[in-house]
Image (tube, rainbow, N blue to C red):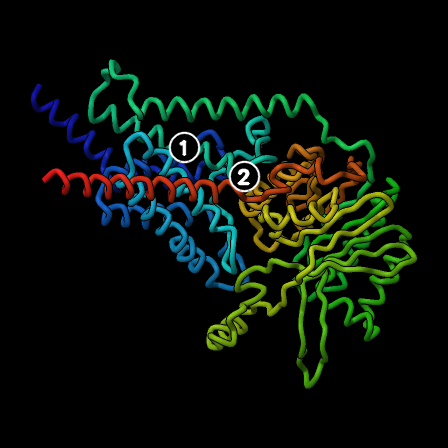
């Protein structure tokens, strides 16, 4: 009997050891995100990691963070190895560690210096703020934010119109941290629930109530359905599924033209091609009367309907076999009888499309140039186009993963977001669906329909509630003609809370943390003064 108890105790200690818990969290996180995207697992995926953060010393927590980062992101971001720059995948793992390490260390510090009843909230608050930091700056890469695992949970995520994705992120992290604290309490004190009024129990109950409230809000919003548009526009979305870097340019363009011609039998109001659908500096080549540019220009004008293409723009000169000037990643909008207008991509892919510190680090710029990296300049205008009574904008590539960027177009009057992207280079269903899962929140946050036109997928029409109305299968040359409902005009008063106020929640969370720390510091100073006076 003693031997049996020893084995059970040893087994329990082993399973509760920090390396095992770290690996467990890593694989639970992998299962939570697309693909496979078992979203319900996200509600317990961080529990083992939070147990480590709250129970172990800092050195073990740091080693645990390294394990979680490299194990999780190896499987989560494996598709990056297909990018044209071979260092993209290993560097992404290092970059993710740079994000995660301070997030965990600050969480550990805050947990150990705040009162027991506030530990769960403080830990979640710090976590959310550091998740937000992944969305800003040159290295912004919002992959791995656990709130995005719920993109198919339509009822739950409707609160994004108020809080953005951060509201969902917060309740998931809060539930995970509350459950971790509750498990620790049971492990340390046993299963005697006579003291059920403990802070751990209360925090768990509060987190469950927040989940219920979010679902109830979703039921109310979806039943009301007041954001569905009363007018519609018929869009032809062209998914050619070709490699834009292929030297066989003529074949690629012929595929797009052929799919476009087939879609005409449905008489679409507007035709949209994906990012890099015309993979050369269109405006410059057109001015130089390049045969391919003239062919595309002539074809678009013959359609006699609005047309959007993804291409490049060049301002400068071609001298001694080199382009000298500025390149832009651009969406061109043709309006019948009016020529074309354009939108220049504002948020460029770091290292892949630009490196802003090339003068400061010329050696790094040379390495990137040899690896085939682009040298683009960012746009500066949040352009909104008009077609009759419809105002719309174009988001290029991964611009749809930045909530604060997307909402600026809606503030400028856009009532339809169109995302043109080229993810076909990855050849990965995981990469395609991960990108799409993030973009779902942009529709809900701003309560406008969102249309994605992708080279290989996901080509889809989402309503203002983030629901899929129509979509194409992945990695198939095809077209989709869909009737997109929209509201032609909207007042500033009817914009969503998130559209008007943006990412206020992460800042509120960190402000709360600072306030609590200041109060704690004040209390300790007062205690010290009183103790001295009593001596």
Nearer to the camera, 277 or 404: 404
Nearer to the camera, 326 or 410: 410
Residue drawn at x 67%, y 62% is: 329
Q: Is residue 501 left or right of residue 21?
A: right
Q: Is residue 441 left or right of residue 196?
A: right
Q: Position of residue 267 (x, y in %)?
A: 88, 42
Question: In terms of secondary structure, where does tag 1 sit?
Answer: helix
Q: Position of residue 280 (x, y in %)?
A: 72, 67
| Quadrant of the snapshot with the C terminus | top left
Which label was assigned to residue 165?
Answer: 2
Residue drawn at x 52%, y 57% is: 82
Rendered image quadrant of residue 497: top right
Residue drawn at x 79%, y 46% is: 391
Question: In terms of secondary structure, where does tag 2 sit?
Answer: helix
Q: Residues within 10 Å of mark 2 (few under 14, many from 20)?
A: many
Mark 1 and mark 2 residues within 8 Å of each other at the beta carbon: no
First in sequence: mark 1 or mark 2? 2
Residue matched to label 1 = 174
**Extreme residue toward the bottom, this view:** 320
| Quadrant of the snapshot with the N terminus | top left
Image height of 223 relative to 427, above or below: above
Q: How many marks?
A: 2
State the separation of the CA atoms marked 1 and 2.
14 Å
Q: Position of residue 76 (x, y in %)?
A: 46, 46
**Extreme residue toward the top, this view:** 194
Residue 252 appears in the rendering? no
Rendered image quadrant of residue 254: bottom right
Q: Position of residue 182 (x, y in %)?
A: 30, 26
Nearer to the camera, 230 or 368: 230
Q: Residues within 10 Å of mark 1 (few under 14, many from 20)?
A: many
**Extreme residue toward the front, this view:** 533
Rendered image quadrant of residue 114: top left
């Amino acid at each position: 009997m003693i031997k049996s108890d020893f084995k059970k105790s040893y087994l329990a200690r082993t399973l509760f050891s920090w390396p095992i818990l770290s690996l467990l969290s890593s694989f639970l996180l992998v299962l939570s995100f697309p693909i496979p995207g078992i979203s319900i697992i996200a509600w317990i995926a961080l529990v083992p990691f939070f147990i480590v953060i709250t129970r172990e010393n800092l050195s073990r927590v740091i080693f645990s963070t390294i394990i979680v980062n490299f194990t999780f992101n190896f499987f989560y971001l494996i598709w990056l190895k297909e990018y044209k720059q071979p260092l993209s995948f290993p560097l992404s793992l290092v970059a993710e560690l740079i994000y995660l390490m301070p997030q965990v260390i600050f969480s550990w510090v805050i947990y150990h210096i705040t009162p027991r009843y506030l530990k769960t909230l403080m830990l979640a608050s710090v976590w959310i703020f550091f998740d937000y930091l992944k969305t800003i700056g040159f290295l912004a890469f919002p992959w791995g934010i656990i709130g995005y695992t719920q993109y198919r949970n339509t009822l739950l995520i409707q609160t994004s119109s108020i809080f953005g994705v951060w509201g969902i992120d917060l309740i998931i992290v809060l539930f995970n941290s509350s459950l971790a604290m509750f498990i620790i309490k049971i492990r340390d004190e046993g299963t005697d629930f006579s003291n059920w009024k403990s802070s751990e129990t209360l925090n768990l109950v509060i987190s469950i109530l927040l989940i219920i409230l979010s679902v109830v809000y979703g039921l109310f919003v979806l039943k009301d359905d007041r954001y569905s548009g009363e007018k519609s526009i018929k869009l032809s979305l062209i998914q050619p599924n070709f490699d834009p870097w292929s030297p066989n340019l003529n074949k690629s363009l012929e595929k797009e033209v052929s799919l476009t011609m087939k879609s005409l039998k449905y008489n679409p109001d507007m035709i949209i091609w994906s990012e890099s659908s015309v993979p050369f500096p269109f405006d410059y080549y057109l001015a130089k009367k390049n045969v391919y540019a003239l062919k595309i220009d002539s074809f678009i004008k013959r359609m006699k309907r609005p047309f959007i293409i993804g291409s490049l723009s060049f301002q400068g000169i071609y001298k001694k076999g080199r382009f000298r000037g500025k390149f832009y990643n651009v969406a061109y909008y043709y309006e019948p009888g009016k020529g074309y207008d354009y939108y220049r991509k504002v948020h460029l892919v770091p290292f892949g499309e630009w490196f802003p510190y090339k003068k400061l680090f010329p050696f790094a710029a040379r390495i990137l140039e040899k690896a085939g990296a682009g040298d683009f300049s960012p746009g500066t205008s949040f352009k909104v186009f008009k077609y009759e009574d419809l105002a719309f904008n174009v988001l290029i590539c991964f611009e749809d993963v930045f909530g604060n960027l997307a909402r600026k177009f809606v503030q400028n009057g856009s009532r339809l977001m169109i995302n043109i992207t080229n993810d076909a280079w990855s050849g990965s269903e995981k990469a395609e669906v991960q990108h799409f899962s993030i973009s779902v929140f942009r529709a809900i946050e701003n309560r406008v329909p969102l249309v994605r036109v992708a080279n290989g997928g996901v080509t889809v029409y989402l309503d203002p509630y983030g629901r899929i109305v129509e979509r194409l299968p992945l990695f198939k040359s095809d077209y989709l003609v869909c009737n997109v409902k929209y509201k032609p005009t909207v007042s500033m008063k009817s914009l969503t809370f998130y559209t008007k106020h943006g990412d206020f929640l992460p800042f509120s969370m960190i402000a709360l943390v600072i306030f609590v720390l200041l109060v704690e510091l004040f209390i300790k100073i007062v205690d010290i003064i009183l103790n001295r006076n009593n001596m």
